[in-house]
Image (cartoon, grey):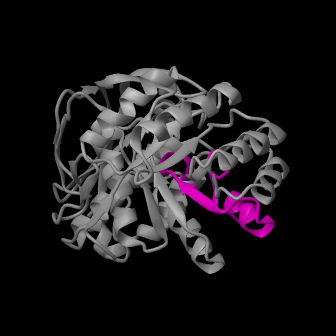
Amino acid sequence: MKITDIKLGRISVPLKTPFKTALRTVKSVEDIIVIIETDTGNIGYGEAPPTGVITGDTTGGIIGAIKDHIRPSLIGMDVENFEEIMIRLHSSVVKNTSAKAAVDIALYDLYGQMFNAPVYKLLGGYRKEITTDITISVNDPEEMERDSINAIKLGYETLKVKVGKDSNLDIKRLKAIRNAVGKDINIRIDANQGWKPKEAVYTLRKMEDLGLDIELVEQPVLAHDIEGMKLVTDNVNIPVLVDESVFSPRDAMTILQNRAADLINLKLMKTGGVYNALKIVSMAEIYGVECMIGCMLEAKVSVTAAVHLAAAKKIITKIDLDGPVLCSEDPVTGGAVFNNSKITVNEGSGFGIKDIEGIKYI
């Protein structure tokens, strides 16, 4: 199964409601689609969102990295030589993790097709169904309370609440939500680097004192501030989940060796795809540190890849893969099945993506 061409396209999918965090506001998914063609007629699909404020990857950057660097390195290679392909992919250009992830996902799709098996079975096959949380965008407390109640009505049992813009207002937001949903609903919060270390400690201790029962806090401080992250981890009881601080296996090792966080959030767009995510998973297993798997604002192609990884590995205990259900429509035929909070892996070969509507080829 030799690679004959790598094509690119764009898709645009409106969101049901604007997605608001401490870093940005987004109204639609605007992603790059990768289509890898082979001499056997098999096609592998990948996807990457331009998320400049997090990954540094823009639409033009993703396109340029793939067209000018990655594509020339991979044309003519046999998918059977998978390790060599991955080495070439990751050495073809530095950084550009979203571009690498999109190609990596398409390659794993082909790898599964080559063995006529779903990818999750090739990676471990731990389970077939996972349960995701749902994101509550940062707004005024009353609107976040309404959004939380609506999510519970749809069957969600875990809310991921965006905070980080104003610590005192964040406390009011969480009080309103907890009072509205009761004690049986899990609430995890994501500050998206929005607090300073001491501010994070103060805010989280206040939430503890108020009995808000927060399951975990994600990325409370700036990504590069590992000392600040450790300060928060060492001084609050709420488990700390590191996200933007971990892109590479090397980043993960730094966090693990310094015990700077309690949990690690895996995102394929940060790691450069499944290949490096598996390395981080292995490290986490050695240290006994559980992982969450998350996504950017992505459609179903790349999130399906994350679903397969989550289904494959026991150490991934927390799921934040609500990207497709935030979209107002689904242009993807095949892939994982999303039924609100319940996600089921498909049993077709590879990632099971059959077609994508509305691609505008580049």
In this rendering, is residue 55 above or below 305?
Answer: above
Would you identify the image quadrant in which residue 352 lies? bottom left
Q: What x and y, as percent, mark residue 125?
A: 31, 76
Q: How many marks overall? A: 0
Q: What x and y, as percent, mark residue 11?
A: 29, 28
Residue at (34%, 35%) from the top-left corner? 149
Does 254 appear in magenta?
A: yes
Does 316 appear in magenta?
A: no
Q: Tell me the quadrant of the picture where the C terminus can be found.
A: top left
Q: Tell me the quadrant of the picture where the N terminus can be found.
A: bottom left
Residue at (62%, 37%) from the top-left corner? 192
Would you identify the image quadrant in which residue 193 lies? top right
Q: What x and y, as percent, mark residue 298?
A: 37, 38
Residue in front for this viewpoint, 343 or 178 = 178
Residue in front for this viewpoint, 109 or 300 = 300
Any part of residue 2 in sight: no
In this rendering, is residue 126 above or below 97?
Answer: below
In this rendering, is residue 294 above or below 193?
Answer: below
In this rendering, is residue 273 above or below 194?
Answer: below
Residue in front for this viewpoint, 150 or 298 = 150
Q: Which residues are magenta?
A: 242-271
Residue in front for this viewpoint, 281 or 181 = 181
Any part of residue 238 in sight: yes
Left/right of residue 344 with respect to residue 240 in the rendered view: left
Residue found at the far bottom of this picture:
286
Residue at (60%, 26%) from the top-left corner? 23
Q: What x and y, as percent, mark residue 24?
A: 55, 23
